[in-house]
Amino acid sequence: MTSLAQVRPPPDDWHMTITFITGANKGLGHETARRLIDQGHTVLLGARDVAAGTTAAAALGARFVRIDVTDDASVAAAAADVERHEGRIDVLVNNAGIHGPHGDPAALTGADILRVLDVNLVGVVGTTTAFLPLLRRSADPVIINVSSSMGSLAATHDPARAESGVIAPAYTSSKAALTMLTTQYAKALPGIRINAADPGYTATDLNANTGPQTVTEGTDAIVTLATEGPGHPSGRFVDRTGEIAWS
Ligand SMILES: NC(=O)c1ccc[n+]([C@@H]2O[C@H](COP(=O)([O-])OP(=O)(O)OC[C@H]3O[C@@H](n4cnc5c(N)ncnc54)[C@H](OP(=O)(O)O)[C@@H]3O)[C@@H](O)[C@H]2O)c1
């Protein structure tokens, strides 16, 4: 049987920043992987679909790790895989997300809400809990939760902002909960820099490619949080222009 000491990288590799990204086979997660590899990170590309994840990882020079954030066994297997191969991570990007139903809340079911919360909120909790022991081995551990201004009371109530015209009760409430979850983690885990990123409205499959931003613009906040280095605060909500209000 191979011991952990045999499969972990040699000590010379421990200065590298190892970044695990969920939902990285396409969209913002994929572009985050590409940009962080460009900046020298060792990227572990998380995806639930083996074929999509393998293809994306091979094209980018990442290592594919299968993870379905709604499946506890899959999340545990992903963390065990990273434990065996890298032995730690420095950055966890909780990016995987779904939109769920638009429109009339009169037709909304509890099952609709649960399906969206399962990925966008519960999936973040399960992944974070599973990867915390690996993050705690880092000299500068970072968690980035990919949230949205669609979960901001201020943005969704400002008639000047596009968010105010969208009715998406499941998605918006899941992201409001995710930003609050982020502040709770930031308070409870002072040794880890934990922030939320708002990509801004970006053309991806999530919105049938209707967003005006490119994926490169949409990943500016995530990449900044992943590369800013020690000494920056925890518990921020950041878009590509800088810190924004939680409310
Ligand atoms: N695009 C925007 O305008 C925008 C704005 C604000 C925030 N965001 C947030 O940005 C994040 C990325 O979204 P995107 O725009 O890049 O959308 P996307 O292109 O649809 O990508 C979503 C990713 O999440 C993955 N995913 C979904 N359910 C999963 C699960 N159960 N387990 C693991 N992975 C799962 C998808 O995998 P499959 O390919 O297998 O489905 C895909 O890789 C999301 O959290 C989203 O809410 C996006």
Image: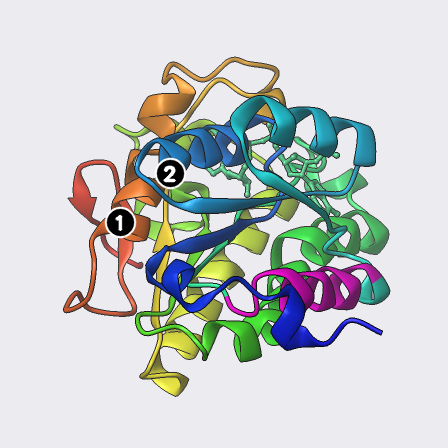
Report the front residue among 114 and 193.
193
Residue 122: image location, x then y, percent: 68, 64
**Rendered-image quadrant of the C terminus:** bottom left
Residue 55 appears in which quarter of the rendering? top right
Residue 65: image location, x then y, percent: 69, 48
Residue 51 versus residue 85 in the image, above or below: above
Q: Is residue 60 visible?
A: yes
Does residue 149 appear left or right of residue 66 in this picture? left
Q: Which residue is mark 1?
A: 227
Report the front residue among 204 and 16.
16
Q: Amino acid at mark 2?
A: Leu
Ligand 1 quarter of the rendering: top right
Residue 5: image location, x then y, percent: 62, 75
Does residue 88 appear left or right of residue 214 in this picture? right
Contact, CB < 8 Å: mark 1 with mark 2? yes
Which residues make up the magenta segment? 74-88
- The kind of secondary structure element at disc 2 is helix
Q: Which residue is mark 2?
A: 36
Label of residue 79 in the image: none
Q: Amino acid at mark 1?
A: Thr
Report the front residue among 65 and 105.
65
**Rendered-image quadrant of the N terminus:** bottom right
Mark toward the start of the polypeptide (1 vs 2): 2
| Dot 1 crowding, Cα within 10 Å, few <14, some 14–19, many 20+ | some
Q: Is residue 122 visible?
A: no
Does residue 140 appear left or right of residue 172 in this picture? left
Q: Residue at x 63, y 27 (%)?
A: 58
Q: Residue at x 56, y 79 (%)?
A: 133
Residue 182 appears in which quarter of the rendering? bottom left
Q: Is residue 231 magenta?
A: no
| Dot 2 crowding, Cα within 10 Å, few <14, some 14–19, many 20+ | many
